[in-house]
Amino acid sequence: MRIGYFLSCEEYGPAELLEQARGAERAGFSALWISDHYHPWVDAQGNSPFVWSMIGALSQATSLPITTAVTCPTVRIHPAVIAQAAATSAVLTGGRFRLGIGTGEALNEHIFGDAWPEEDVRLEMLEESVEVMRGLWEGGTFSHHGKHYTVENARIYTLPENPVEIYVSGFGPKAVDVAARIGDGYVSTMPDGELVSRFRDNGGGSKIAQAGFKAAFAASAEEGAKIAYEKWPNAGVPGELSQVLPSPKHFEQASQLVTEEMVGESFVCGNDPAAHLEMIDKYRQAGFDEVYVANTGPHYQGLFDLYADQILPKIS
């Protein structure tokens, strides 16, 4: 199993993200995830650098593969523009870039006043966006007149040697079926073996399945839980709220119903290597090929040291 590190753009600024990427590579992590947001989930997280600028910087700061987790190529940015950004990222990284995509959240996509579509329409838009991007990556002049997108006489001149792989996120049956049909891989954040099996059985086959979880490294589990609750109370917001709430203040309001205990249960808190190994094993048992760990709070060097000494040497 490949173990990677998740760069949280919602919580850290550009300099810290680059520092974490270098630290992750020194510690022995084998790949990077990076989030793509316009806003943080809550103001306490406090950041949201532009992911495409960060990937350009990361291409020069580390030799690790990079996957966006995940980009929404449907509303805020037209898929023809994402196609160009992804192609350039793949060239900069020497082919080490993978485009993770999903249907997104109103939190990031509503900023121009566009209506936020229902789930079925968002999935339909996502599928068409993949058609647009792959058409542009074939080279030559490309036009598309679809239900949701129009592209006229467009050509991407800077292309990687091989087309960018697209990994599709899915947290419910409909989305997983789309991922299986159109994706080069699958992305999730839950150790749900049924969804992995659905992906593989409906067309995904042996394609890579990625997942991620959050940690809060600290001197004790209690301290870690406090950090996690301060920075990520939205982790306990249930159901579709994460897709439909439009701003950090709305997530803060919903998070008033979330307790520290609820957030602590979804994070690996503290410095116990057994807790991390147990969480990784849940994803292994669910059938994932790659798992990415994100740290929250200031103690990310402690997490790197823990993984270098006591986690990564035990993972095969």
Image (tube, rainbow, N blue to C red):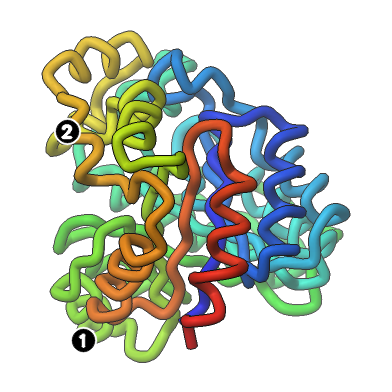
Name which residue lies at 25% across and 71% down. 282
Q: Amino acid at mark 1?
A: Asp
Describe the element under mark 1 as helix, strand or loop.
helix
Write down the residue under mark 2.
261
Decide which of tag 2 and tag 1 comes sooner along the chain: 1
Residue 197 locus on image (x, y percent): 20, 81
- Label 2: state its secondary structure: helix
Seen at 37% across and 62% down, the residue is 276
Is residue 138 positioned above or below 131 on the image?
below
The residue at which mark 1 appears reads as: 201
Task: Measure the C-alpha gap from mark 2 to mark 1.
Answer: 36 Å
Residue 284, horizontal then vertical, whole percent? 32, 79
Which amino acid is tagged 2?
Glu
Query: 229 or 194, which is in the foreground?
Result: 229
Q: Can you tell which quarter of the image residue 275 is in? A: bottom left
In this rendering, the answer to whether 241 lies above or below 175 is: above
Q: Residue furthest front?
A: 219
Q: On the image, which quarter does residue 93 sit in?
A: bottom right
Mark 1 neighbour class, 10 Å CA radius: few under 14, some 14 to 19, many 20 or more: few
- Between 123 and 51, the residue placed more toward the observer is 51
In this view of the protein, which residue sits in the foreground, 62 or 103? 62
**Percent x, y for residue 145?**
49, 50
Residue shown at 46% from the left, 56% from the top: 293
Q: As drawn, is 116 to the left or to the right of 300? A: left
Front disc: 2 or 1: 2
Residue 7 visible in this rendered orientation of the protein: yes
Answer above or below: position of 213 versus 187. Answer: above
